[in-house]
Image (cartoon, helix red, strand yellow):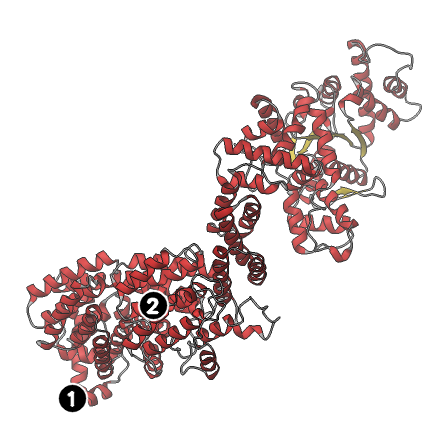
């Protein structure tokens, strides 16, 4: 809705609903008495244009229209509106009509008249009679529409006169449509004048246009279609206000078409808006303009508060609140405890009227005031960063630094960059170094390639050794996590980030995901063989580190290959050798992660804890958020081994979030590996749907055969299939897992889960072979916890007395190692074996121990299974669910039932067990009756009852 530049012609966008309501008022007025309607809204919302459209619609129906617009108060004499109305009515009467002369005399008093323009009460009554008579004459031929625009400007005498003319007594076929600005009628016709005239009127409050309507208005005024993002931004900045949108569109129209996508800074601060708002506020309250400008300065990313606005405007708090009340009534300021201008374009326009130095002075004054009030750091930093002049105060730099760190922690790198860029200029010494590094983190978080270029530029310019090595570490880590080696050739070649050997190291680490090691990765590894430091290389702490990072990369690669080929001693030796190359690990924190994980996988907890403590004391890289995030998987793995599942879950989640936030590509091998670890922990905690959702999010529910680094991902997928009863899918995944060469990367638990799945699908021989392999690997590791886990798995597969001896030895070792999670499993396995041997009291005691440990660890599935076994053993569920029926099954019934669930036909079961088909059918019928099912079609129910299938398999295995 706007007025065109070519003349008084008015065009309107939207408002169809309001036009329909005014049309209904015209229909009612044509058949009845006086109808009144009031159109209200904020300045520029389109009240005048709507009244003009209503008048045009009335004229099209054959109505007589009398349109009166009230000028500002200082230009309107007392009783002026009444005189204007009399003149308009006189012009509509025939020239010979006796009332016309009288009305002309009222509208045009003698030129020599002096003194007050208000007529005497007797004269007013005479004029009233003439006006009512004229309206009666006019309505005899056609209905009359009285349009009263800007009624809030009318004087009290005129409003009272119009009220008496229309309502005492009411005239027929007259419709009064008036408009008034919200918040301004208080300065109009005195208290009660306008409300009395429009008492009971139909209310039409106008609000902002819809986004599509705003885009249409911009297109019409700018004479070209703006880009969708430009239109959306203009709509938000103007809150759909047509007058503000029109001014913005006029600025856009003057810009070249090829710059339509340029920043909207100029378009969103049109001078006409500032002039319009400033003039309007000055006519209402001399303090309102000061307060509006103070609010524009005070609000940054958060709303202003009254005390700060009062300080900036130089007014008392009472004067400030009174002016704010007016701005609220005008809908320019939100009605809230905090203050902000509802239209960003108004704020930008008001700020645009200030000189640069005036804005700087205002923002620095606001920052100083807020610091004195001990406001949050980010609120103070907003004003410090808004000034182009650095505040020379000792507290300014620390405040900016704290605000930048807070914004980084809140994942707001754009804000962090603003704060930290100013902190770099304001700070010195250690604070400046910290600000530089945090700024690099923010730049990398916004745009990886641009951030890396900026980091390299900073590295080339700095001469501080204390700053160079942390910068190198950030460049190395960000490049490895965010750069796709396969995409480099398809896009712009990556720039040289000061170290030409970094990319080969990253390619080598990526190549470890495949087996056997690709020739390209192997050649890379040979090219990265350790070199002796050159003569010009510093011995310690140098920024170049010469061959230190190459030595670390070579040692880690050898250690990981030894671990994958089940050579624990060589793996531990290589990891320890890599961790001695501290400088190289600072440059490549992924190498540190792999070295520590190799030690953790092989049970060297003391070594891991010692190196974690050393890393924490390393001033070069510990402060880097990515370096800290890359150590969380190590501490999470240690927590998992000790049975602290919740801690492991939280740390893995934090690491995954941090890597994703810093631009790690979705299919990065390291990210997928973390996904597998987190999904395994969620499965252990009984959060299967969340584990499934996580795998689905990263494309791991379906995919190619597992590689060496990601066997745990597919193993977790197979466990999810088993929980859902998809035993055929489990068998297919196990075939890929067991056929792929190389050992596990997740330590002994990979063997444990593999044995469990092989048992569930009936591959008992292969399960026992895998358990023996696990024991050999654990013996080679030489650590009590890993040996205890291996003995537990092997003991669960065997019967008494060998199985009992193995399980009791496993529990002794696991208890000494404080491995509560595996100790709970061992106690549950021993209880099943004791139940089968008829030693119920001992079995119940072991189940109680297992339940206590499982609850302490947060292992809900294990705790549920133990509770169900206790309930079944005590007979509490025998008559209520299939769980109690498990203990009633004979060993032959269990064996035949499990084979049937796995998909074997009766004939195949009979052939395998060397019994007749009739015997198989009789055993199945007995099992169905005990489990309260009717046949094979009810097998899915065995998986819907949580814990029943594992209980059945476990009891059959013992």
Image quadrant occupied by the N terminus:
top right
User: Badges 2 and 1: C-beta atoms under 8 Å apart?
Assistant: no
Question: Dot 2 corresponds to which residue?
Answer: 597
| Left or right of residue 62: residue 565 | left
Query: Residue 621 at x, y = what percent?
Result: 43, 58
Identity of the residue drawn at 66% across and 44% down = 209
Q: Report which quarter residue 576 is drawn in.
A: bottom left
**118 or 30, which is in the foreground?**
118
| Left or right of residue 620: residue 861 | left
Residue 393 showing in the rendered view: yes
Q: CA distance from mark 2 to mark 1?
A: 51 Å
Dot 2: element: helix
Disc on res. 441:
none
Image quadrant occupied by the C terminus:
bottom left
Identity of the residue drawn at 39% across and 69% down = 673
**466 or 721, which is in the foreground?**
466
Residue 21 showing in the rendered view: no
Dot 1: element: loop
Query: Residue 719 at x, y = what percent?
Result: 31, 71
Query: Residue 685 at x, y = what percent?
Result: 29, 61
> Label 1 crowding class (10 Å Cα cut-off): few <14, some 14-19, many 20+?
few
Q: Report which quarter residue 761 is drawn in.
A: bottom left
Tell me if residue 31 comes above or below residue 870 in the rendering: above
Q: Report which quarter residue 624 is drawn in.
A: bottom left
Tell me if residue 868 comes above or below residue 408 in the rendering: below
Disc on res. 915:
1
Tell me if residue 584 comes above or below residue 184 in the rendering: below
**805 or 758, which is in the foreground?**
805
Query: Which mark is in front, 2 or 1?
Result: 2
Identity of the residue drawn at 22% across and 75% down = 778
Identity of the residue drawn at 8% across and 76% down = 801
Query: Residue 407 at x, y = what percent?
Result: 50, 48
């Amino acid at each position: 809705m706007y007025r065109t530049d070519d003349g008084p012609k008015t065009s309107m966008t939207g408002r169809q609903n309001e036009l329909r309501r005014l049309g209904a008022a015209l229909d009612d007025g044509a058949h009845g008495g006086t109808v009144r309607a009031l159109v209200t809204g904020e300045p520029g919302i389109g009240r005048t244009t709507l009244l003009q459209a209503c008048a045009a619609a009335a004229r099209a129906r054959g109505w007589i229209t009398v349109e009166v617009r009230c000028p500002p108060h200082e230009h309107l004499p007392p009783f002026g509106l009444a005189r204007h109305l009399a003149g308009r009515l006189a012009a509509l009467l025939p020239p010979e009509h006796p009332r016309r002369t009288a009305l002309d005399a009222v509208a045009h008093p003698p030129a020599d008249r002096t003194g007050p323009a208000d007529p005497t009460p007797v004269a007013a009554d005479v004029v009233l009679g003439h006006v009512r008579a004229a309206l009666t004459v006019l309505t005899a031929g056609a209905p009359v529409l009285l349009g009263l625009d800007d009624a809030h400007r009318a004087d009290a005498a005129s409003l009272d006169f119009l009220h008496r003319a229309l309502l005492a007594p009411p005239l027929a076929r007259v419709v009064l449509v008036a408009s008034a600005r919200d918040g301004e009628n208080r300065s109009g016709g005195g208290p009660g004048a306008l409300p009395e005239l429009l008492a009971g009127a139909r209310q039409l409050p106008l609000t902002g246009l819809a986004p599509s309507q705003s885009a249409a208005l911009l297109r019409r005024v700018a004479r070209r279609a703006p880009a969708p993002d430009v239109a959306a931004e203009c709509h938000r900045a103007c809150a759909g206000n047509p007058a503000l949108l029109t001014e913005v569109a006029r600025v856009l129209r003057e810009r070249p078409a090829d710059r339509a996508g340029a920043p909207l800074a100029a378009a969103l601060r049109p001078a006409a808006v500032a002039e319009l708002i400033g003039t309007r506020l000055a006519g209402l309250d001399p303090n309102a303009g000061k307060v509006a400008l103070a609010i524009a300065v005070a609000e940054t990313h958060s709303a202003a508060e009254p005390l700060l606005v009062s300080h900036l405007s130089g007014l008392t708090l009472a004067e400030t609140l009174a002016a704010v009340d007016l701005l609220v009534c005008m809908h320019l300021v939100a009605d809230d405890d905090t203050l902000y201008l509802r239209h960003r374009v108004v704020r930008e326009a008001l700020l645009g009227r200030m000189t640069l130095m005036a804005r700087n002075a205002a923002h620095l004054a606001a920052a100083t005031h807020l610091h004195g009030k001990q406001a949050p750091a980010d609120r103070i930093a907003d004003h410090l960063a808004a000034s182009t002049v650095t505040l020379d105060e000792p507290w300014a730099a620390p405040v900016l630094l704290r605000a930048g760190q807070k914004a980084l922690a809140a994942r707001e790198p754009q804000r962090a960059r603003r704060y930290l860029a100013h902190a770099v200029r304001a700070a010195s010494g250690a604070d400046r170094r910290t600000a530089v590094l945090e700024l690099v983190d923010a730049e990398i978080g916004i745009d990886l390639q641009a951030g890396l270029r900026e980091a390299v530029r900073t590295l080339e310019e700095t001469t501080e050794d204390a700053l160079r090595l942390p910068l190198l570490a950030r460049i190395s880590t960000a490049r490895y996590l965010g750069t796709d080696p396969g995409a480099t050739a398809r896009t712009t070649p990556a720039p040289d980030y000061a170290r030409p050997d970094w990319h080969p190291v990253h390619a080598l680490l990526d190549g470890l995901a495949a087996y056997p090691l690709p020739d390209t990765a192997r050649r890379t590894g040979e090219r990265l063989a350790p070199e002796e430091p050159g003569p010009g290389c510093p011995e310690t702490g140098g920024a170049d580190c010469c061959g230190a990072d190459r030595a670390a990369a070579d040692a880690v690669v050898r250690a990981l290959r030894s671990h994958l080929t089940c050579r624990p001693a060589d793996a531990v030796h290589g990891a320890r050798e890599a961790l001695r190359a501290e400088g190289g690990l600072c440059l490549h924190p992924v190498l540190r992660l792999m070295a520590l994980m190799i030690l953790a996988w092989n049970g060297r907890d003391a070594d891991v804890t010692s190196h974690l403590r050393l890393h924490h004391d390393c001033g070069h890289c510990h402060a880097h958020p990515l370096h800290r995030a890359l150590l969380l998987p190590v501490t999470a793995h240690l927590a998992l081994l000790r049975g602290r599942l919740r801690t492991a879950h939280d740390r893995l989640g934090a690491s995954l979030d941090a890597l994703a936030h810093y631009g790690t590509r979705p299919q990065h091998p390291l990210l997928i590996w973390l996904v597998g670890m987190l999904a395994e922990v969620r499965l252990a905690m009984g959060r299967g749907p969340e584990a499934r959702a996580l795998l689905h999010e990263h494309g791991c529910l379906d995919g190619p055969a597992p590689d060496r680094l990601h066997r745990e991902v597919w193993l977790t997928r197979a466990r999810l299939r088993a929980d859902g009863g998809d035993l055929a899918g489990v068998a297919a995944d196990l075939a890929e897992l067991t056929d792929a060469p190389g050992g596990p990367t997740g330590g002994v638990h990979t063997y444990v889960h593999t044995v469990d799945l092989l048992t569930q699908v009936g591959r008992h021989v292969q399960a026992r072979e895998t358990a023996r392999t696990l024991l050999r690997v654990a013996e080679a590791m030489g650590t009590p916890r890993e040996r205890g886990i291996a003995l537990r798995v092997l003991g669960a597969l065997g019967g008494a007395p060998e199985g009992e001896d193995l399980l009791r030895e496993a529990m002794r070792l696991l208890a000494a190692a404080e491995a509560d999670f595996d100790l709970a499993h061992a106690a549950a396995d021993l209880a099943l074996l004791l139940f089968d041997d008829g030693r119920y009291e001992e079995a119940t005691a072991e189940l109680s121990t297992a339940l206590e440990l499982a609850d302490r660890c947060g292992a809900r599935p294990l705790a549920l299974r133990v509770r169900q076994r206790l309930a079944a053993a005590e007979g509490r569920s025998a008559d209520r669910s299939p769980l109690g029926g498990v203990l009633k099954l004979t060993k032959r019934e269990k064996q035949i039932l499990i084979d049937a669930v796995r998909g074997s036909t009766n004939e195949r079961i009979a052939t395998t067990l060397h019994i007749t088909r009739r015997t198989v059918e009789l055993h199945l019928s007995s099992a169905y009756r005990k489990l309260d099912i009717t046949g094979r079609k009810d097998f899915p129910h065995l998986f819907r009852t949580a814990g029943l299938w594992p209980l059945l398999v476990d009891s059959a295995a013992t």
